[in-house]
């Protein structure tokens, strides 16, 4: 396997409580050729998260902290990190999620075996404090396409990695703020690369935070509709069909 540099894109907002564990999960990777770019999105925590990151950055030059001059949501913070990224591979890791030690090694191996441009993986869903499973693990499909993603988003950001030698660097639509910005991102990519492959191994722990914007599904109904109708330009019947599929699948996905 080619030892290409992996750029890890990490937006942070009020991340002091968990970002240290997230960084530790990166430091534990068996694949060592990475850079981690953490962008603090003007967190209103009196610099608590920044201080945690700085402690790690002072000890390991692969960790880079950028302090955003303005709050622009996860989309804007990710774009700042993407502009600074130097790697062949782009990966994403939210500031409260955790990678298993072999995440990068296994995902890059999987990518090369599939001759894929982008891959993602299954993930555990854990309680934010106890780290016990809050829901059964989410096991992804073998692959997704643009059309399948209109019905449901199977790609969780912290599980995804793509190869810049096979596609261009894509930036986030900052008009989306922090709601459905990743979904729009994957849809945009899949128009070009056509297919992304899912690794059924559970390689990520997704910390289910009660304060998360996506914890309340009612809050994402309109943004989901907006993506289908306004961003993707689907017809009214197609938008209704796909959002109905999304609602049913989301219910099943989060059922205990």
Image: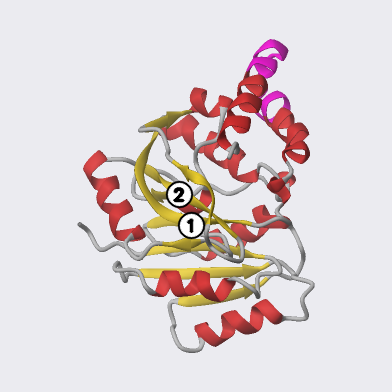
Q: CA distance from mark 2 to mark 1?
A: 6 Å
Identify the image quadrant of residue 34.
bottom left
Dot 2 falls on a residue whose secondary structure is: strand
* Residue 193 belongs to magenta span: no
In terms of sequence position, does the residue under pointer 2 or pointer 1 come before the other? 2
- Residue at 51 percent across and 22 percent down: it is 147
How packed is label 2: few (under 14 Cα within 10 Å), some, or many (20 or more)?
Answer: many
Q: Quadrant of the N terminus?
A: bottom left
Q: How is the image coloured?
A: secondary structure
Dot 1 falls on a residue whose secondary structure is: strand
Residues in magenta? 228-241
Q: What is the count of numbered marks? A: 2
Question: Which residue position is annotated with label 1?
Answer: 205
- Closest to the observer, 37 or 204: 204
- Give percent across and percent down for residue 166: 35, 44
* Residue 234 belongs to magenta span: yes
Q: Residue furthest top?
A: 237
Compared with 138, 109 (above or below) is: below
Compared with 173, 22 (above or below) is: below
Compared with 228, 29 (above or below) is: below
How packed is label 1: few (under 14 Cα within 10 Å), some, or many (20 or more)?
Answer: many
- Closest to the observer, 139 or 223: 139
- Residue at 44 percent across and 70 percent down: it is 25
| Labels 2 and 1 touching (C-beta < 8 A) | yes
Q: Quadrant of the C terminus?
A: top right
Compared with 133, 240 (above or below) is: above
234 on left or right of 97: right
Question: Which residue position is annotated with label 2?
Answer: 123
Q: Principal SS element in the magenta part?
A: helix
- Give percent across and percent down for residue 23: 49, 73
- Give percent across and percent down for residue 194: 41, 29
């Amino acid at each position: 396997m080619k030892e290409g540099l992996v750029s890890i894109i990490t937006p942070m907002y009020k991340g002091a409580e968990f970002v240290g564990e997230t960084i530790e999960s990166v430091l534990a990777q068996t694949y060592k050729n990475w850079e981690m770019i953490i962008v603090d999105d003007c967190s209103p925590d009196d610099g608590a998260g920044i201080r945690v990151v700085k402690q790690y950055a002072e000890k390991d030059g692969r960790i880079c902290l950028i302090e955003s001059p303005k709050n622009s949501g996860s989309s804007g913070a990710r774009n700042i990190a993407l502009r600074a990224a130097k790697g062949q591979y782009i990966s994403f890791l939210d500031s409260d999620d955790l990678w298993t030690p072999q995440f990068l090694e296994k995902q890059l191996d999987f990518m090369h075996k599939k001759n894929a441009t982008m891959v993602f993986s299954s993930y555990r869903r854990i309680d934010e404090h106890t780290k016990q499973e809050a829901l059964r693990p989410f096991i992804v499909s073998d692959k997704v396409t643009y059309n399948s993603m209109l019905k449901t988003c199977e790609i969780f950001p912290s599980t995804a990695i793509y190869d810049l030698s096979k596609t261009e660097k894509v930036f986030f639509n900052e008009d989306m703020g922090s709601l459905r910005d990743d979904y729009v991102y994957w849809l945009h990519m899949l128009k070009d690369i056509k297919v992304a492959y899912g690794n059924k191994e559970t390689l990520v722990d997704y910390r289910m935070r009660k304060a998360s914007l996506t914890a309340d599904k009612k809050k994402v109904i309109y943004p989901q509709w907006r993506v289908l109708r306004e961003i993707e330009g689907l017809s009214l019947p197609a938008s209704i069909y796909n959002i109905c599929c999304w609602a049913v699948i989301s219910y099943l996905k989060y059922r205990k």
